[in-house]
Amino acid sequence: MRRIQKQPEPESFIKWKQDRKNRNKVWKNFNPAIKQAVRQSLLHEQGHLCCYCEMSIEEPTCHIDHLIPRSINELLKFDYYNLLASCQGEDEAERKPAYCGHKRGDQPLPISPLREDCIQAFGFTESGEIFARNHSKSREAAEQTIEILGLNVPALKRQRSAAIQGFLGEDFDTLPYEIQQKLLYQLDQLNSSDRYEPFCSAITFVLRQNMIL
């Protein structure tokens, strides 16, 4: 879970909310064109990664998730700073909600991806498992977050592991330190298509464990 820095909301969304007739709209009646503009904006600010698991997402493969659920605070349903783009979170075998936004439902999230130090609470293994880091002051919150979002379901662990091995397979541990540092820096940047590398936090964590000291 990398930190998401919210950007200004789309002008079309602002104008839509300023129209008095839209003030009491329910979420299911959200104007489709405006909703699409919001979704595209969220994808852009997240570098086309799911806000929770960091898999690659596009418009057809994501949904808008409310950081503070509507069941807790309905007034925030159209607050752009409460909106995130999550993957569909379905298990490929059973086609049932299994992880990320659909898995959490209306449960409050102990660690938010908007939190500046959120990534510091989590670690990853080469096999793709995410865990709460021992030294973290937020260890219990991290464990709860992993459970609530289902971040260790088999499908996610397989995808993380494949992403990690794709970099370790390049003999990362034998590269000169300067090259290792450059690669780690690039993993933290948007590419030429304004996208982050899928599962970049997991890849970066494991690569750092394999760095030449």
Image (spheres, helix red, strand yellow):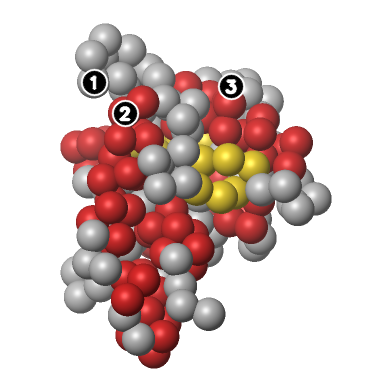
Mark 1–mark 3 Cα distance, whole angstroms, equals 23 Å
Along the polypeptide, which appears first: circle 1 or circle 2?
1
Q: Which mark is drawn over residue 92?
A: 1
Q: Are marks 1 and 2 in contact (CB under 8 Å)?
A: yes
* Residue 6 at x, y percent in the picture: 51, 61
Q: Amino acid at mark 1?
A: Glu
SS under mark 3: loop
Q: Is residue 169 above or below residue 183?
A: above
Q: Which mark is residue 106?
A: 3
- The answer to whether residue 170 of the structure is visible from this angle is yes
Residue in the image at 58% along x and 40% along y: 131
Q: Nearer the viewer, residue 114 or 73?
A: 114
Earlier along the polypeptide chain: callout 3 or callout 2?
3
Circle 1 Cα neighbour tier, 10 Å, few/some/many (<14 / 14–19 / ≥20): few
> x, y (%) of residue 12?
35, 56
With 25 as the anchor, is 183 left or right in this view? left
How far is mark 1 from mark 2, CA to CA? 7 Å
Q: Is residue 77 above or below residue 118?
A: above
**In the image shown, does 45 or 187 lie closer to the viewer?**
187
Q: Amino acid at mark 3?
A: Asp
Which image quadrant is residue 169 in?
bottom left
Task: Kindly identify the residue that appears in the image at 64 percent across and 57 percent down.
Answer: 120
Q: Mark 2 highlights which residue?
A: 155
Residue 88 in the image: x percent, y percent?
Answer: 32, 30
- Count the numbered circles shown: 3
- Of residue 108 and residue 31, the one placed in the foreground of this image is 108
Query: Disc 3 or disc 2, which is closer to the eye?
Result: 2
Give the residue at x 29% y 40%: 159
